[in-house]
Image (cartoon, rainbow, N blue to C red):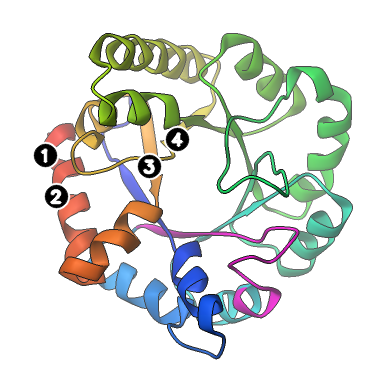
Amino acid sequence: MPNELRLGVNIDHVATVRNARGGAYPDPVRAAKIAEEAGADGITAHLREDRRHITDGDIEALMEALTLPLNFEMAATDEMQAIALRHKPHAVCIVPEKREERTTEGGLEVAREENRLAHFIAPLREAGCRVSIFIAADQRQIEAAHRIGAEVVELHTGAYCDAHAEGRFDERDAELGRIAEMATFAHELGLEVHAGHGLTYDCVQPIAALPELVELNIGHYLIGEAIFLGLEASIREMRRLMDAARA
């Protein structure tokens, strides 16, 4: 069972701050370099259909500048598939996307679209991209992700984090139990298991302690904490908490 726990730092909201005013500052590539120095194991960037934060130019610059692996989050659309096939990032994470949502609100519905998604990810796998599917901690979705040929599942931790933040501790503990059970189930199927969405210093350690998890992807909270601590310090503290939980 894996003991190392990787940290993927999502830099989307560095681009959000830049885009609020326009221009070139703050630069997501610079943020990625700082993340590497602070102990990140990979960089995550979500190119949305509406380009609300990360842009096509950011993806090009990241591919050129990064020494860390790039995890390219994207919707299952022809446009995004073409971009991924052009750049061939280390990993591609397929996420649900609705134009009106503020952030990704839930996991991808794989079971209902199994045939379409199987055909969608096949060229990505052939191009050498490691395909991950962002899903709820649900057995039906995990089984479908396995059947379509995904190598990785990323379990959505948003409900767990929300329950913790709102003091609904019975719901939080139930959700943690569900994530733990489904992480074990996915691992036993031979899938690599990641997790993410909404994780903070206050709630990351019970998730990080789950032995089947190989990677956590965290972004918005780290960029927010960077306002107060600086980006390097905010990432180092998350890395410290994760390592302590796993130890």
- Of labels 4 and 2, earlier in sequence is 4
Residue hosting label 1: 244
Res. 216 mark: 3
SS at circle 2: helix
Q: Which amino acid is tagged 1?
A: Ala
Q: Would you call the spot at circle 4 few (<14 residues within 10 Å), some (14-19), or many (20 or more)? A: many
Q: Which amino acid is tagged 4?
A: His
Residue hosting label 2: 240
Distance (Cα) linking label 4 and label 2: 18 Å
Distance (Cα) linking label 3 and label 2: 13 Å
Q: Is residue 44 magenta?
A: yes
Res. 194 mark: 4
Q: Residue at x 83, y 24 (%)?
A: 113
Q: Would you call the spot at circle 3 few (<14 residues within 10 Å), some (14-19), or many (20 or more)? A: many
Q: Which amino acid is tagged 2?
A: Arg
Q: How many numbered markers are drawn? A: 4
Distance (Cα) linking label 4 and label 1: 18 Å
Q: Residue at x 73, y 62 (%)?
A: 50
> Depth check: 199 or 179 in front?
199
Q: Which residues are magenta?
A: 41-58
Distance (Cα) linking label 3 and label 4: 6 Å
Q: Position of residue 234 (x, y in %)?
A: 21, 61
SS at circle 4: strand
Q: Position of residue 52 (x, y in %)?
A: 64, 65
SS at circle 1: helix
Quick check: marks 1 and 2 in contact, CB under 8 Å? yes
Quick check: marks 4 and 2 in contact, CB under 8 Å? no
Q: Would you call the spot at circle 1 few (<14 residues within 10 Å), some (14-19), or many (20 or more)? A: few
Q: Is residue 171 magenta?
A: no
Side of 159 relative to 173 (left or right): right
> In terms of image quadrants, where is residue 140?
top right
